[in-house]
Image (cartoon, rainbow, N blue to C red):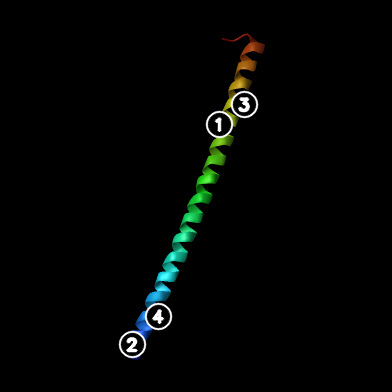
Amino acid sequence: MDIISILGTIVGCVGLIVAFWQYRKTKSLEGNIRSHNWFMYQRVNNTNGTTQIALELYKKITNLK
């Protein structure tokens, strides 16, 4: 084996390792984004419910329908 084939094999193996590492980081980031989006959805949904309750109380106090 000559030096070029050895270097090519090393570069190929390093490329595979980097690709696998990058894939794992991408999956981790997708999971973090998904959980953050779900958290924000829950907060917005809770805020919407609070707003609806406040509107109903306001209508009841001011006798609006």
User: Residue flagged by tag 4: what amino acid is it?
Assistant: Ile
Mark 1–mark 2 CB contact (< 8 Å): no
Total number of numbered discs in the rendering: 4
Q: Earlier in the sequence, mark 3 or mark 2?
A: 2
Q: Earlier in the sequence, mark 1 or mark 4?
A: 4
Q: Earlier in the sequence, mark 3 or mark 1?
A: 1
Residue drawn at x 42%, y 66% is: 19
Mark 4 residue element: helix
Mark 1 residue element: helix
Residue annotated with mark 4: 10
User: Residue flagged by tag 1: what amino acid is it?
Assistant: Asn
Asked which quadrant contains residue 58, the reply is top right
Residue annotated with mark 1: 45
- Separation (CA) of disc 3 from disc 2: 68 Å
Residue drawn at x 61%, y 14% is: 59
Q: Earlier in the sequence, mark 2 or mark 4?
A: 2
Residue 3 x, y percent position in the rendering: 35, 90
- Extreme-front residue of the structure: 1
Mark 2 residue element: helix
User: Residue flagged by tag 3: what amino acid is it?
Assistant: Thr
Q: Would residue 2 be found to the left or right of residue 18 on screen?
A: left
Q: Earlier in the sequence, mark 4 or mark 3?
A: 4
63 lies above or below 30: above
Mark 3 residue element: helix
Residue annotated with mark 2: 4
How packed mark 4 is, by other alpha carbons closer than 10 Å (few <14, some 14-19, many 20 or more), is few
Residue 47 x, y percent position in the rendering: 60, 31
Residue annotated with mark 3: 50
- Separation (CA) of disc 4 from disc 3: 60 Å
